[in-house]
Image (spheres, grey):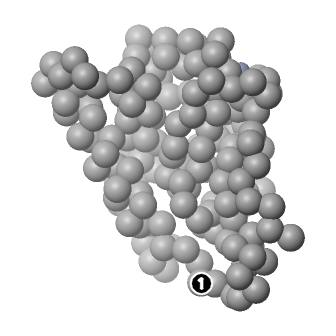
Amino acid sequence: MYTGRTEKPCCLCGNPETAHRIDIPPRAVQLLKHSGPIAWRDIEGEASLHFCESDWGTVRELVLKTGMSPLSRCNAGRASFVLREDFEALLNDTRAEPDQRPLERKLRQEAEEIIERYEDGDQMVENRDLIEARIVTWALEDLGADEVAADD
Ligand SMILES: [Zn+2]
């Protein structure tokens, strides 16, 4: 049965009250804790991570002050995304493995643009956007700069 995206708790502590969300490319789900059983290639659209107010403070420190990605501390089981099978159930149809490349390209470009604006001294860049941009670019660097190959 198609259940859609359910609201997920804080991916760090499990608190159901979340205050912030970031979106990451499906490929970056591999970098999360306990991501082993997740068929990330079947994820449709981006994956989202939610954080409670208090853990968002930790994430901000980690990313903006320490220069480290929080992804390896985030529980993949608390990430929010839609799998291909859910769509198939909805549409009553078999779909091909989603092509994640255009989305990954878009997320990468947006992230690079935000970092560039920030480095140029643009005061309008939101902390939240900068944090997301850093996490996305680090993740893609970690995974190898190349986009997912079609026959990967
Ligand atoms: Zn939390």
Q: Quadrant of ligand 1?
A: top right
User: Which residue is pictured at 52% across the width and 43% down the height?
Assistant: 23
Q: Nearer the viewer, residue 117 or 61?
A: 117
Q: Is residue 12 visible?
A: no
Q: Is residue 9 visible?
A: yes
**In the picture provided, is 135 more to the left or to the right than 59?**
left
| Residue, disc 1 | 96
Is 86 placed above or below 105 here?
below
User: Which residue is pictured at 62% across the width and 63% down the height?
Assistant: 43
Snapshot quadrant of residue 135? top left
Asked which secondary structure carries label 1, the reply is loop
Is 146 placed above or below 8 here?
below
Snapshot quadrant of residue 45? bottom right
**In the picture provided, is 24 more to the left or to the right than 51?**
left
**In the picture provided, is 12 more to the left or to the right than 47?**
right
Residue 14's spot in the image, x, y percent? 79, 27
Q: Residue furthest right?
A: 1
Query: Where, quadrant-wise, is the N terminus in this rendering?
Result: bottom right
User: Which residue is pictured at 15% across the width and 19% down the height?
Assistant: 121
Residue 16's spot in the image, x, y percent? 79, 28
User: Which residue is pictured at 22% across the width and 17% down the height?
Assistant: 123
Residue 10's spot in the image, x, y percent? 72, 29
Snapshot quadrant of residue 94? bottom right
The amino acid at mark 1 is Ala
Residue 101's spot in the image, x, y percent? 41, 66
